[in-house]
Amino acid sequence: MIETIRKLGRWGLGSFERLGRGHIFLIHILLGIPSVLARFGLLVQQMLSVGVLSLIIIVVSGLFVGMVLGLQGYNTLVDFGAEQSLGVVVALSLVRELGPVVASLLFAGRAGSALTAEIGLMKSTEQLSGMEMMAVDPIKRVIAPRFLAGFISLPLLAAIFSAIGVVGGYFVGVGLLGVDDGAFWSQMQAKVDFSEDIMNGVIKSIVFGFVVTWIAVFEGYDCVPTSEGVSRATTRTVVHSALAILGLDFVLTALMFGNI
Amino acid sequence: MHNSKTVEIIVGLFVALGIAALFMLAMKVSNLSAFTGEGGYIVTARFENIGGLKVRSPVTVAGVRVGRISEINFDNTTYEAVVSMNISGDYNTLPTDTSASIFTAGLLGEQYVALEPGGDEKYLQQGGEVRLTQSAIVLEQVIGQFLYSQAEGGGDAK
């Protein structure tokens, strides 16, 4: 009995300790960001591997998500004779929810896991401690550029996802199902508000970008430096990122649209 | 790996693409390119009942959108709704005896304010008031009146 309570306590202490380490680590990263801006080449290199190479999965998923929304929305709306509103349905669902959330989930799977694995492997092959021996701060040299690259890339990727999704919805709705071209765009423009809908979506994607990259670099930096430890850290990155995205999405939606 | 110049060009294209996507969302998807309310003037109107009218609902003349509802307040002394309309500066020749009515677009559509220009020589200015107003039609009241008049008419016939 006492043993069970002790285990619970140990687990609790361990979790809090990790949480604290994560926050201290975040402060170190943020302090390291000015030195990244001084060495712009590092950031550009990371933007390539984190952002540009995630572009294909984002574009293809965005297109198909938009096309599915077009089909599903049409089938529901046509019952009410309101298929003209298809543009509104597609644009609002993408801009408010699916763009930021799905792009972040894909980003966590594609780029977040790669970041964790890379940093974890650097740690287990003692490259990070090697840098410290050479008086190079690994947080400034390795972690901060990756963090900043992810933080900048995700909002851009989410915007691309939403834009491509709207085009996909347009293909299916107007091209295949015969919704009126003018009504599709004009109703969309009448109902979608720039500051209310689009900017809130952008704010969401900025928050998700921050959280996902933070989780990814922390898990990599904090992993047990063995092959098993790296694999576990990678798994944790994807799971924790997904949970954080969906949980935060609810909180942000409630704050932005819920009138709470 | 890559030449650093190529990398920079590719990343530059990526960032440009992201910004272009945001720009497309702003211009093509949202209402940013449409009437923004800048350079417009505010006109108020008092209604007995505004039905389902909301802030940002359209204001039209002859079916053309000329502005938006910017504010809806309640007057504590006259028990009327005070609706402020932000009308685009392009349409500054509405006569002072213009009348305002609240209509519904379609059977289930949103409600909007339709302005009907009068014949006065003077034009509405910033802070002006539309005096002739017609309230929203509340479906329950119409049905109620219809049933009442049916019952009355039926009683007369006998």
Image: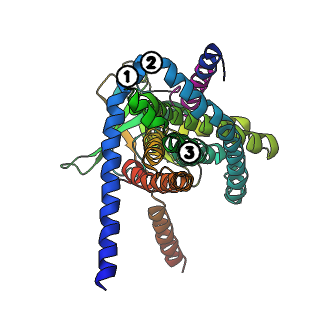
Return the residue at label 3: A117
Mark 3–mark 1 contact, CB under 8 Å?
A: no
Looking at the rendered structure, the number of numbered marks drawn on it comes to 3
- The quarter of the displayed image where residue B24 is located: top right
Magenta-highlighted residues: B12-34
Seen as rendered, the residue at the extreme left is B77
Mark 2–mark 1 contact, CB under 8 Å?
A: yes
Q: Are marks 3 and 1 on the same chain?
A: yes
**Residue at image coords 34%, 74%:** A7
Q: Nearer the viewer, residue A152 or B106?
A: A152
Chain identity of mark 3: A
**In which quadrant is the N terminus of chain A drawn?**
bottom left
Q: Specify few, some or many for label 3: CA neighbours under 10 Å numbering under 14, 14-19, or 20 or more.
A: many
Reading the chain from its start, which is encountered first: label 2 or label 3? Answer: 2
The answer to if B18 sits in the magenta stretch is: yes
Marking on residue A35: 1
Position in image of residue A101 (x %, y %): 54, 48
Position in image of residue A21 (x %, y %): 32, 49
Return the residue at label 2: A39
Q: Are marks 2 and 1 on the same chain?
A: yes
Tell me how far mark 2 sits from mark 1, CA to CA.
7 Å
Q: Secondary structure at mark 2?
A: loop
Position in image of residue A39 (x %, y %): 44, 18
Left or right: residue A72 versus residue B125 is: right
Residue B149 position (above or below residue A105): below
